[in-house]
């Protein structure tokens, strides 16, 4: 195999897993190509968090059938969450697939490719490598300034709607020493920002021999010379400790931005989702956060139309959005997932109700985001200039709160921090002027 092409669906975790697969394959001398028709192997890195993502994958996979007929030597691989969920069942829908492996098998990719080359029958290996979280895996990163760093894998929470714990397994944390070494290596290569990844970063450290919790890890990374900014995702509200709030307040490199999925504003729905916090408990955390870090940019995830969600439950979510005033949200219609506890709940809602509720949530949030962005006008922000703006001729950068700012500045400033005065604001980006 000389060349490969990776098609990635889903979250940042998957994006980063694809960077790792690229790193592993390049290390064995293969070349990444952006043209699927030129590749000797096409890898789908799949997502199964919602049904829609799954449908999208199967339709893309179906389109490759002709390519495979035209190039019989072409190998097609399926990785990620659908591979883990479906295993060899993928072959009954797409018998032309050659290799199927799960998210915890990525560290063995080179070996899987060798084993697959040596045979004509498809190879399915989703057993998972129990030592995966201790492996040092190369990564070819898409960005040159900002890097994702996995700090833990899996999730122990079992929210009743979610497939992740079944597909990505129990929580396993990487050793702090390995993470610090990776971040030091990134700093040496000129990276300025890291985003720490995990399904539930707040419970980082469970089961580690060295007793380091997530705030402790942040402290270690804050000391890495050359790294200017640290972000992380995702946090579970139940595990948001006072120590973490203090870390957000006190560690200069930890950005004032937090993604804290609430999912619903109704206690009845939260309980049925097995979120293990209440609306008041969540709001209390937000109050503490805002007191400690007044500039904090908050984002969240919302699920509308969870089984049994009444109109009143839904209105509680709307009110919560107005009360918290998030900078941005990701909102989804509840989607039935195989093997999850929510499937067995009665009172599943119609697509029409879900659609209407989603629409109301998004319309409300649009107004709030626009308002919050407007409030930035006249303020001075530090931005990391990271490239050319999509809005012609300007550079683009991000504030510590992760908002995009377009600014007139020389390209030589790309990669550096700059102070800008915000002069105008739209829904998805701000415009600024460089300070003297
Ligand atoms: N249906 C809809 N949204 C879901 N999410 C996870 N599982 C489902 C599901 N079955 C959403 C949650 C989570 C985000 C990553 O995806 O909001 O925080
Ligand atoms: Fe899924 Fe809940 Fe774990 Fe997030 S915390 S990955 S929503 S089970």
Image (cartoon, helix red, strand yellow):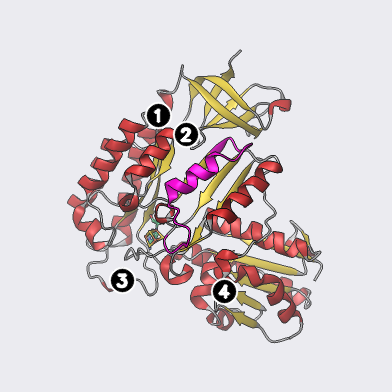
Residue that lies at the very extreme toward the front in this rendered image: 210
Residue under pointer 4: 129
Pointers 2 and 1 in contact (CB under 8 A)? yes
The region drawn magenta spans: 206-229
The residue tagged with tag 2: helix, strand or loop? loop
The answer to whether residue 97 shows anywhere in this view is: no
- Name the residue carrying label 2: 401
Displayed-image quarter of ligand 1? bottom left
In the displayed structure, would residue 119 be above or below residue 207?
below
Graded by Cα atoms within 10 Å as few (under 14), some (14 to 19) or many (20 or more), the crowding at tag 3 reads some
Viewer-nearest of discs 2 and 3: 2
Q: Is residue 38 left or right of residue 434?
A: right
- Between marks 1 and 4, how big is the CA–CA gap? 42 Å
The reply to whether the magenta stretch includes residue 228 is yes
The image shows residue 333 at horizontal and vertical percentages of 36, 56
Q: Residue at x 27, y 62 (%)?
A: 274
Mark nearer the N terminus (4 vs 3): 4
Q: CA distance from mark 4 to mark 3?
A: 26 Å
**Location of mark 3 (residue):** 341
Q: Which residue, given by chain and number where applicable, does mark 1 sit on?
A: 295
In this view, the residue in front, 105 or 50, is: 105
């Amino acid at each position: 195999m000389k060349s490969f092409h990776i098609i990635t669906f889903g979250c940042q975790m998957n994006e980063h897993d694809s960077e790792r697969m690229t790193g592993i394959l390049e290390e064995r001398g293969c070349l990444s190509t952006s043209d699927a028709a030129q590749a000797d192997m096409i890898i789908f890195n799949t997502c199964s968090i919602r049904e829609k993502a799954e449908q999208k994958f199967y339709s893309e996979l179906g389109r490759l059938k002709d390519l495979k007929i035209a190039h019989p030597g072409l190998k097609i691989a399926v990785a990620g969450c659908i591979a883990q969920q479906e295993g060899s069942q993928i072959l009954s829908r797409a018998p032309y697939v050659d290799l199927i492996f799960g998210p915890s098998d990525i560290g063995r990719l080179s070996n899987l490719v060798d084993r697959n080359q040596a045979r004509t029958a498809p190879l399915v290996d989703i057993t998972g490598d129990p030592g995966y979280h201790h492996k040092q895996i190369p990564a070819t990163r898409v960005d040159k300034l900002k890097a994702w760093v996995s700090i833990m894998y899996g999730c122990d929470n079992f929210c009743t709607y979610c497939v992740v714990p079944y597909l990505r397994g129990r929580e396993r944390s990487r050793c702090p020493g390995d993470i610090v070494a990776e971040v030091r290596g990134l700093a040496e290569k000129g990276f300025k920002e890291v985003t720490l990844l995990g399904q539930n970063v707040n419970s980082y450290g469970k089961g580690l021999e060295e007793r380091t919790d997530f705030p402790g890890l942040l402290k270690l990374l804050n000391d890495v010379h050359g790294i200017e900014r640290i972000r992380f995702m995702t946090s579970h509200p139940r595990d948001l400790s006072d120590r973490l709030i203090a870390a957000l307040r006190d560690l200069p490199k930890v950005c004032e931005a937090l993604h804290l999925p609430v999912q619903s504003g109704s206690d009845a729905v939260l309980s049925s989702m097995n979120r293990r916090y209440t609306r008041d408990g969540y709001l209390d955390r937000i109050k503490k956060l805002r007191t400690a870090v007044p500039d904090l940019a908050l984002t969240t995830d919302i699920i509308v139309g969870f089984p049994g969600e009444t109109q009143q439950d839904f209105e509680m979510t709307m009110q919560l959005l107005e009360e918290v005033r998030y900078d941005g949200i990701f909102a989804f219609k509840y989607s039935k997932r195989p093997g999850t506890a929510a499937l067995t709940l009665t009172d599943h809602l119609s697509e029409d109700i879900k659609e209407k509720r989603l629409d109301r949530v998004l319309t409300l949030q649009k107004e709030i985001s626009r308002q919050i962005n407007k409030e930035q006008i006249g303020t001075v922000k530090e931005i990391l200039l990271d490239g050319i703006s999509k809005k012609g001729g300007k550079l683009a950068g991000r504030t510590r709160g992760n908002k995009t700012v377009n600014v007139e500045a020389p390209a030589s400033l790309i990669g550096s921090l700059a102070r800008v005065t915000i002069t105008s604001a739209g829904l998805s980006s701000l415009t600024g002027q460089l300070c003297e």
